[in-house]
Image (spheres, rainbow, N blue to C red):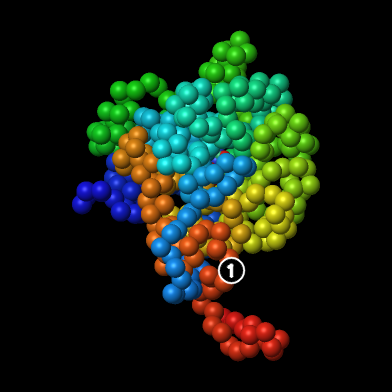
Amino acid sequence: MTRRDPVSIGDLRDRARRRLPRVVFDFVEGGAETEHTARANLDAFTAWNLIPNVLVDVSHRSQQVELFGRRLSTPVLLAPVGIARIAGSRGELAAAEGAVHTGTVSVLSTSSSVPYEAVAQAADEPQWFQLYPWGDRSLTSTLLRMARAAGFEALVVTVDVPIMGGRERDLRNGITSSFRPTPRTCLDMLRRPRWLVDYLRHERIVPAVLSELSAATGRHTPMLAARGQSMINPSHTWDEVDWLRDQWPGPLLLKGILSPEDAGRAARRGVDGVVVSNHGGRQLDFALATLDALPEIRATVGDRVTVLLDGGVRRGTDVVKALALGADAVLIGRPWIYGLAALGGDGPAAVVDLFKAEIDRALALVGRPSTGDLDLTVLRAAGTRAVGADGSGRGAVVYRR
Ligand SMILES: Cc1cc2nc3c(=O)[nH]c(=O)nc-3n(C[C@H](O)[C@H](O)[C@H](O)COP(=O)(O)O)c2cc1C
């Protein structure tokens, strides 16, 4: 790294904010309504302090994890983010390439702005596919066959979008179902020449998956686009999960689980994993912060189901806390977009490398040589203090706020 290279995700975010037009930065950064949940996701990590053990041999450290039989170099995955080319022309390709380069995996959004064939070809290792199930099962079925044939390994079904959340920044900026530029947004874009040149030099941004489906089914793109609206389908129930379980032979995950009851339902239906997620605070405002939802969900599903978490993960110590509270791994959404906007196509890989360096440092400093050594003993809720023995005679202590 040179002296001017960003040294934290916060630095990358600052650079992304300077480089992107306001309307684009707001689209990425915004949460629903008051944005309470988007902030709460971040704050939940600050509610835990770390208690290091010293004089532990930490000369050899490992943050590798195994998910569905595949070994990853780090417990940090790249979350599905739609229309990523808006932040940088390599878009979702950069995420997949960065994941392969750093030994992890990316999840391609149904709303990808890069054809998924291209993503599958660019990545030497199988990536994961995120699905918004269509109302029309035959289209969903075709899409899944195509994703499977292209080599996608795991299917991540997003279940927290029965309707769209109220993204007020987007409404104020003129983004509803499509973008209507105003004189203010045009002027703002002109003031971001680096972004503008990158944007104008490349193909128009479209939901690429619609074109691919159109080619596969012979139906016209506009008709599919209209049907695409039904990707957001308020009538889906758990029956859809049973149907999808039959359709997808590989690992199946549900993304957007916050309630332990729902996690239990998912486990009983043969789902392989859940992503504890509130869509980065972009759907239900005042939804529980994901880190606060995690322990009960892990307690409910035990070891039957892989538990991932996303929302607000910005530091290696955040990853350590999530793993100590029961996550098998985490996903990052906005951080890889900051990297893409700030550093171009190499950005997502640089972001994962930053996380890896911070996780490695955190493991050494808390005295846990590997991610497998992390458990609740490394954590203490901030603002609590020990008030004395609990009377059991086992040395356990009672904590109070
Ligand atoms: C700009 C943007 C677009 C997103 N698009 C999708 C999507 O297409 N599908 C999906 O399941 N989640 C989508 N998400 C949610 C992310 O997958 C993830 O849950 C969230 O970003 C995690 O929070 P974080 O950004 O704080 O890391 C999107 C998030 C952002 C910020």
Q: Is residue 153 left or right of residue 113?
A: right
The image position of residue 41, as x and y in percent, is 52, 57
* Whole-percent x, y for residue 151 in the image: 57, 26
Q: Position of residue 54 (x, y in %)?
A: 44, 75
Residues 369 and 47: in front is 369
Q: Estimate the x, y position of residue 22 in percent, counting from the top left.
A: 35, 42
In this rendering, would 111 be left or right of 148? left
The residue pinned by badge 1 equals 376
Count of all numbered marks drawn on residues in the image: 1
Say above or below: 128 vs 391: above
Q: Is residue 94 above or below residue 307?
A: above
Left or right of 250? Residue 18 is left
Tell me which residue sits at (22%, 48%) in the image.
2
Give the image quarter of residue 386. Answer: bottom right
62 with respect to 340 (left or right): right
Between residue 315 and residue 190, name the one nearer to us. Answer: 315
Query: Of helix, strand and loop, which one carries label 1?
Result: helix
Is residue 98 visible from the viewing direction of this image? Answer: no
Q: Is residue 310 above or below residue 105?
A: below
Above or below, 16 against 345 in this view is below
Identify the amino acid type marked 1: Leu
The residue drawn where x is 25% and y is 48% is 1
- The answer to whether one can see residue 243 in this image is yes
Which residue is pictured at 56% across the width and 23% down the height?
150
Query: Looking at this rendering, what residue extends furthest in the top direction?
Result: 218
**Of residues 15 and 156, the one drawn nearer to the viewer in this rendering:** 156
Quarter holding the C terminus? bottom right
